[in-house]
Image (cartoon, grey):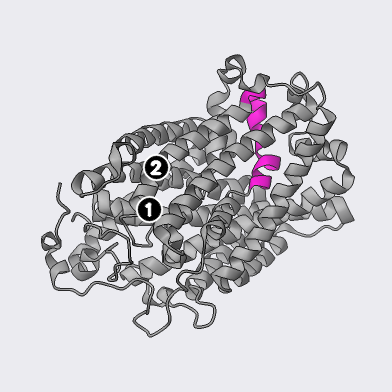
Amino acid sequence: MAVESTSRQGAADSAAPRCEGDAETDGSPGLRRASLGVADIAFFVVSAAAPLTVMAGVAPLAIGVGGVGAPVGYLIAGAVLAVFAAGFTAMTRHVRSSGGFYAFITRGLGRPAGFGAATVALLAYNGMQIGVYGLLATGTRDTLDALWGIQVPWPAIAIAGVFVIWYLGYRSIEFGAKVLAVLLLAETGILVLLAGGVLLDGGAEGIAWDSFTPGNVLVPGTGAVLSFAFAAFTGFESTAIYRREARDPGRTIPRATYIAVGFLGLFYAFSVWIVIQAYGGSRIMKAVAADPMGLFFTATTHYVGGWAADLMHLFIITSILASQLAFHNAINRYGLSLAQEGVLPQVLGRVHAKHRSPYVAGIAQSVLALLLVTGFAVAGADPYRQLLLWLNTPGSLGLMGLQALTAVAVVRYFRRTRHEEGRWRSLIAPLAAAVLMAGAMWLVVSKIGLMTGASATTDTVLVLLVPAAFVLGVLISLRIRRTRPEVYAHFADEPAEEPTGEPAAGQAPA
């Protein structure tokens, strides 16, 4: 079918198209273009997932409910997200807006749905980033106590973390990419050391492959494993947010997306399998029951040495900081885009003259983090069970919901637009991804009590925050359509310039 023309846009006909990121209305510079390569974007995405933290802090719980077959859950989650990436990356070659999920959903499902997606994205990314300050506080507090006997109140650690992340986000994106590269290599390197020690020693009972047999995979706990596994990939889709700063985004973004999904899926499954070999298939469940949070540390001490376990404690802290920086940068770019759309206050669209970072959006996000962290501290909340889990739960659910909506939007977009993507990328894969992501969301919601440890009432509120945010966004879109029609008409529009070699895209449906 033909690309939908702009003549159906009403007010859009007479208004000038925006030029995304080059110069703001206040004369401030835009983001630094062509500054990120495939590796840089992949570092941002993989760092957001915090591999070491996921393995040491969450994987033991997955083993506890899924047994020795737990590694397959991570492979399944990775495969599902790779199917999603087929349509997602195809869309990145046609939609050049830096709005990420909300731009894609606007193209396929219309502006009200796009506004709803933008609101959910702000909830989800802020929930993931700010909630992890609770994990940073508990992890740092425990490490200081274990290694040096120093005891520091958790709010002090969390607040210090807010300022550290603000500063790193304030600096240039290249600086942030270099920091993340170092931190990511450190956290994955310590797990590689553990793997080498286990494989060279032969494990506790010899190297076994029973983790991959149907009898150990098709067990009642597999659904719970999948809920943990899908949450472990959080943030991989943020590649599209860095479009303005990417070199040759039509190639860079798809490659970075596939590298991130492939690496995380294989690395997670391999690391979980390694720790099972470290204890032996017949003993792993007893070890998990006795000390789940010490599972990886004890194995590292035995197979590598106590010094490596001490490093693992330190690298978990840097892993958490890397994750927070990646999410902070993603939130700032969402805020920048929405400010340039005219949806958020214009001041959030300012870019720093020297560092070319969305520094005002970064300040706003850091202030929000300070307010929430302080509020939880004053209320006497637990940093892990409440600050972390209560904010991360709607965050991870929101991102999964956005992925499912994006998959549907991809199908509708390519049905209305001329393209040469093929049926797999434009129809089959996104349809399959929509069904699989909806199933994954159902699994996570059905096992939500395992992830939060909260009451049924609290869990219900946390789950309902996501659809409530979407409805709020739709209502905001209707108000803006009535009061500021020019903003509504140009919401998620393509930038004015046409980068060489990239196809022009259709406009969003009304």
Residue at the farthest bottom position = 27
Circle 2: is it few (<14), some (14-19), or many (20+) Cα within 10 Å?
many
Location of mark 1 (residue): 101
- Tag 2 and tag 1, C-beta contact below 8 Å: no
- The front one of 244 and 346 is 244
Using the image as rendered, state which of residue 367 and residue 397 is in the foreground. 397
> Which amino acid, by three-letter code, is at mark 1?
Phe
Give left or right: position of 507 versus 458: left
By secondary structure, the bulk of the magenta-drawn segment is best described as: helix
379 left or right of 115 in image: right
Q: What's the residue at 59%, 61% (across, down)?
A: 325
Q: Residue at x 42, y 76 (%)?
A: 30
Give the image location of residue 416, x and y in percent: 19, 47
Going by the numbered disc 2, the residue's amino acid type is Ala
Kind of element beneath mark 1: helix
**Magenta stretch encompasses residue 256:** no
Numbered disc total? 2
Which segment did they paint magenta?
A: 51-69
In this rendering, does residue 116 appear at all? no
Q: Is residue 389 above or below residue 40?
A: above
Residue 17: image x %, image y %? 24, 72
Q: What is the crowding at mark 1: few (fewer than 14 residues within 10 Å), some, or many (at least 20)? A: many
Q: Position of residue 24 (x, y in %)?
A: 37, 79
Residue 313 located left or right of residue 242: right
Image coords of residue 502 (percent x, y):
32, 60
From this view, report whether residue 303 is shown above or below residue 67.
Answer: below
Residue where numbered disc 2 is placed = 86
Q: Quadrant of the C terminus?
A: bottom left
With respect to residue 258, does 510 lie above or below?
below
